[in-house]
Image (cartoon, grey):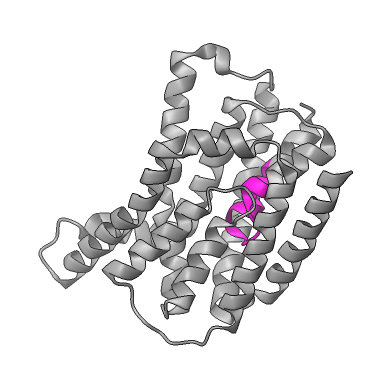
């Protein structure tokens, strides 16, 4: 992998992890268009770890507040424990998908650009629906976080945006926009960090899984993913507050049609 390819894929990962356009879908399209082979497990570890760090950087005050509040016997402590429980509940649907369905899904969808295109069209429709939703200012609850978790589980499909699916689900359930954005980004941290840790374990157990990607390429890809992710996360928070989804709905629709057209060539 050339340095410029590592930077490009890192930027694509960082931007699309948070902007509602599907990181997995764009990485698949990028590899298909550029003719880049699978970069390997090590590359996946560094770019996903870098985007997780960008989330931590943006929400560092919230994360510290939660960690400090968990053991406290106070209103703040109760709120922190409730939020942590909400995050755990939201992870249940994703855990079910990963344990029982993920291997089969990856085998069936790997390299199928037409499936990515169809999923992007679905994302486009979902974003447009969320854009048309009113501002109701509701609060999170046990049922709503479970349903948001189901949206996150569906977003394992390449082309369906995780942030787009979870934030849209929250808005359609009437959740306040600021709370929807905050919960959507914080709820994904445990799954990302957990998946990254498992990948690291796999690399330690089987060094042969290390790709031929150079250390320099891994470093620049991680830096590109972190910086672009930092910008995208902050931008997405502002967009959710302003209900600025329509542009992304159009974008996903156009790219989805192009992806389906590309699959026929």
Asked if residue 11 shows in the view, the reply is no
Q: Is residue 158 left or right of residue 251?
A: left
The magenta span reads 10-25
Residue found 53% across the figure and 53% down from its top: 155
Give the percent coordinates (x, y) of residue 85: 25, 58
Asked if residue 147 shows in the view, the reply is yes
Residue found 58% across the figure and 32% down from its top: 107
Q: Is residue 251 above or below residue 53?
A: below
Give the percent coordinates (x, y) of residue 40: 63, 26
Question: Mainly helix, strand or loop, the magenta region?
Answer: helix
Q: Quarter-wise, where is residue 163 in the image?
A: bottom right
Closer-to-camera residue (69/163):
163
Q: Is residue 15 magenta?
A: yes
Q: Quarter-wise, where is residue 98 in the image?
A: top left
Q: Is residue 72 left or right of residue 213?
A: left
Q: Is residue 241 above or below residue 190?
A: below
Q: Is residue 115 left or right of residue 142?
A: right
Give the percent coordinates (x, y) of residue 239: 60, 73
């Amino acid at each position: 992998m050339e340095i410029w390819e590592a930077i490009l894929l890192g930027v694509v990962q960082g931007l699309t992890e948070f902007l509602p356009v599907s990181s997995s879908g764009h990485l698949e399209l990028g590899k298909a268009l550029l003719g880049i082979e699978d970069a390997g497990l090590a590359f996946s570890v560094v770019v996903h770890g870098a985007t997780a760090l960008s989330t931590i950087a943006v929400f560092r005050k919230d994360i510290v507040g939660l960690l400090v509040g968990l053991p406290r016997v106070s209103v703040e402590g109760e709120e922190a424990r409730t939020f942590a429980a909400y995050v755990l509940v939201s992870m249940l649907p994703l855990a079910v998908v990963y344990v029982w369905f993920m291997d089969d899904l990856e085998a069936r969808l790997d390299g199928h650009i037409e499936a990515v295109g169809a999923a992007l069209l679905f994302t486009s429709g979902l974003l447009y629906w969320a854009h048309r939703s009113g501002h109701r200012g509701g609060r999170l609850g046990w049922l709503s976080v479970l349903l948001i978790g189901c949206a996150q589980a569906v977003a394992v499909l390449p082309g369906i945006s995780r942030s787009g699916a979870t934030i849209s689900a929250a808005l359609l359930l009437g959740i306040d926009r600021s709370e929807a954005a905050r919960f959507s980004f914080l709820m994904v941290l445990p799954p990302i960090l957990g998946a990254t840790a498992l990948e690291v374990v796999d690399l330690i157990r089987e060094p042969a899984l290390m790709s031929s990607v150079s250390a320099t390429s891994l470093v620049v890809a991680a830096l590109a993913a972190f910086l672009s992710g930092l910008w995208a996360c902050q931008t997405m928070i502002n967009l959710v507050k302003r209900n600025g989804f329509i542009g992304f709905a159009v974008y996903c629709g156009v790219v989805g049609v192009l992806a389906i057209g590309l699959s026929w060539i």
